[in-house]
Amino acid sequence: MKLTWFGHSAFRLELAGAVVMIDPFLENATFKGDVKAAYKGATHVVLTHGHDDHIGSTVEICQATGATLVANFEVCMYLAGKGVEKFSPANHGGTVDFGAFTTSYVPAWHSSSTIVDGKPIYLGNPAGVVFNAKREKTFFHMGDTDIFSDMGLINEIYQPKIGIVPIGDRFTMGAKLAAMACKRFYTFETVIPAHYATFPIIDQTADKFMAEMTDAKTKVLVPERGVAVTL
């Protein structure tokens, strides 16, 4: 698989037979590349929850590429009203087979909403998403979350080897809790920190997380934005 980070929690996951955009907040301040090139060829858009900094360019991507939206039911219905035509709803505990890969939605401790005319709109439960594809290591995007003990159960059931972990603090785990989650509850081979540097009120670098992980066997990978890495 190939993985490209675009800043914040936005990723492009390339698998045999599929190109998946995850939480495509491509117009964040840290990504200086071409947004249309970033999502070229997308077959699916997978969302962990309904906050604007995760929905991002979803409608544009789905309309431009014909990609299928994968999200919780409420997010799918909300974005269908914005012009998304193809969608496949999912929720905690459910696994959906898309041929080239499967997604399994698991819990995350966070919130999920948007603001319309100054009022909050409920957009279902936040989630993490586990991806499985033939001949590939199991890949897990935690979404936005706090640490919680059932992470150990997620690890037992799905055994993810590559993890995207939010580290920015304030709205998600900070460095210390994120490292504790990775070391105590998961058996990752590689982790990629996310959800930092995009707003002034969250951590601006991954340095503290990397320092907390120095005693772990897990590899910490901090990709350059817009540059694909092979995993």
Image: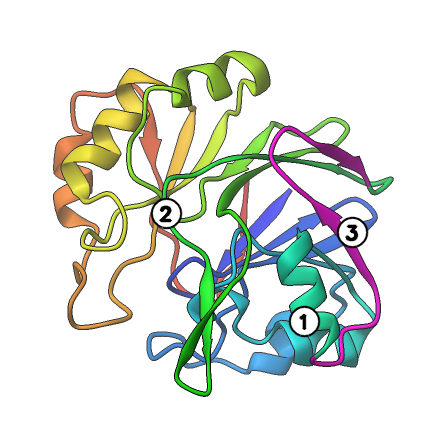
Tag of residue 110: 2
Please state if 76 lies on the left or on the right of 108 as rendered: right
Tell me where residue 66 sits by quadrant.
bottom right
Give the residue drawn at x 38%, y 48%.
144
Q: Secondary structure at mark 3?
A: strand
Judging by the rendered image, the residue that carries numbered circle 3 is 18
- Does the stretch in magenta take in 39? no
Residue 85 in view of the camera? yes
- Between 191 and 44, which is closer to the camera in this rendering? 44
**Residue 217, above or below 146:** above
Q: Which residue is mark 1?
A: 79
Residues drawn in magenta: 82-97
User: Label 1: few (<14), some or many (≥20) within 10 Å?
Assistant: some
Which amino acid type corresponds to the residue marked 1 in the rendered image?
A: Leu
Q: Report helix, strand or loop for mark 1.
A: helix
Residue type marked 2: His
Q: Nearer the viewer, residue 213 or 91?
A: 91
x, y (%) of residue 210? 19, 39
Q: Residue 191: where, in percent of width, then height? A: 38, 36
Which residue type carries mark 3? Ala
Residue shown at the point (45%, 57%) measured from the top left: 112
Q: How many marks?
A: 3
Question: Where is residue 92 shown, x and y percent of the image?
Answer: 60, 34
